[in-house]
Image (cartoon, helix red, strand yellow):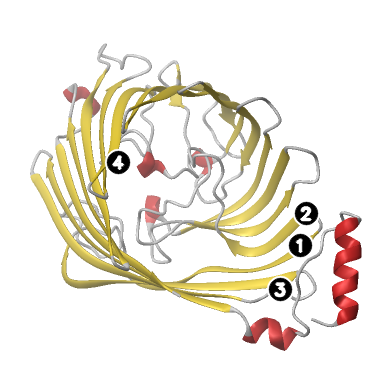
Amino acid sequence: MSKTKGVVNVICSLLLVPIVQSEESLGDAISNGATQLDLRMRYEQVDQNAPINLDADALTLRTRLNYLTSSYQGFKSFVEFDDVSTLGIDDYNSTTNGQGDKAKIVDPVGTEVNQAWVSYKNGETYFKWGRQRIILDNQRFVGGVGFRQNEQTYDGFSITNSSFENTNIFYANVHSVNRIFGKEGVGGAKGDHKSDTDLLNIKYEGLPLSTLVGYAYLIDNQDNSRFSTDTYGIRYQGKLRDLNYILEYASQRESGKNSLKYKADYILAEMSYQVDDVALTFGYEVLGSDSGDAAFITPLATGHKFQGWSDQFLVTPGEGIADVYFSADTNFDDIKLLASYHHFKADQNNIIGHDDLGHEINLSATKKIGIFTVNAKYASYSAGDVSFGKSDTDKLWLTVSTVLK
């Protein structure tokens, strides 16, 4: 660093003017960038007791390669490629491979550009253009579905601003959603959805031991009109001594070309408490229904994180769903252990008066071994009333992953 630049940095720091470290030239920014290789191999087994047994086995490898340039006059660029392939075990329905007689494991093979964006930072404002990852709050409404081998990403532009004290403002306009079904997705599982969607999330952290978030997610989906919805909500997350709690409410109605005229509510109440080395969590989540005709939906969510890992309710039943859940997690001999239980009921009875949507048990163990992370995960869903068309399902995942830089 030259003496002149050093003096300028000192003066600017004293004046509290932000300094963005920048390469001397565009060539330096490119040559001094960072490359990362991310490998994730997974075996997944499904045992589904449908009217006829639907089993499936898949051994897949996701290879992710990305490159991030250094900063040049506030600009950076990033590109990331994903390849999903099978490793000798491909007895499953990926939704695109024509094996409709098998249970679904939504990891279609293929190679895609997962992300490709240019960003610019000016003071406390950060702009990003292109294909990007968008993850908001706990991903209940907007996320990347990172568990699946093919991630969900978004084409558009986003702005993040933190110039107001204790406040973070995020806004994005999305014109395409690149979903987990890959480019070759067909029918209801179409890979990319054209969109004109506005996402606004404002987070305030100036309250004592708590965070307040307000959001508006205005989805105009041009390939699936049912996904076109306007959702407005508020989320409060706080701490009282050893008790952590979350309270959230949202209201949703149709928008765009959605032919269903409805209004439905979302409610979340969750609390967690640490007992010695065990973290206990109890929660109650409702995706409400409007007279059984249409229910609250979350088309951009990371659905696998919620309502059990067997993915029974990625599409909310028209009667809505209430999930009472309990979980416990701890560490034993450097192994992270998690167990949870979900009990599901319809928000409103169906036309024959039933409301039992079943229950589910989830178990997980994760350990770091050298440069590898090893995870074993299991889900067992037991169906409720037959009138809801669900079936008992067991799923097992064995995953090994590593990141090389």
Q: Which amino acid type is marked by label 4?
A: Asp
Q: x and y percent of residue 371 in the render?
A: 32, 68
The residue wearing badge 1 is 121
Q: Residue at x 82, y 59 (%)?
A: 18
Per the image, the residue denoted by label 4 is 311
Disc on the earlier residue, 3 or 2: 3
- Please rate how many residues cluster around mark 3, counting C-alpha atoms within 10 Å: few if below 14, some from 14 to 19, many from 20: many
Residue occupying the point 8% across, 45% down: 53
Which residue was labeled with disc 2? Answer: 125
Task: Give how far apart the Cα atoms at labels 3 and 2 are.
Answer: 15 Å
Numbered badge on residue 71: 3
The quadrant where residue 331 appears = top left
* Rendered-image quadrant of the N terminus: bottom right
SS class of the residue under badge 2?
strand
Q: CA distance from mark 4 to mark 3?
A: 41 Å
Q: Is residue 269 visible?
A: yes
What amino acid does circle 2 point to? Thr
Q: What amino acid type should be assigned to the residue bearing mark 3?
A: Ser
131 above or below 325? below
Q: CA distance from mark 1 to mark 4?
A: 38 Å
**Earlier sequence position, callout 1 versus callout 4:** 1
Quadrant of residue 75 within the rendered picture: bottom right
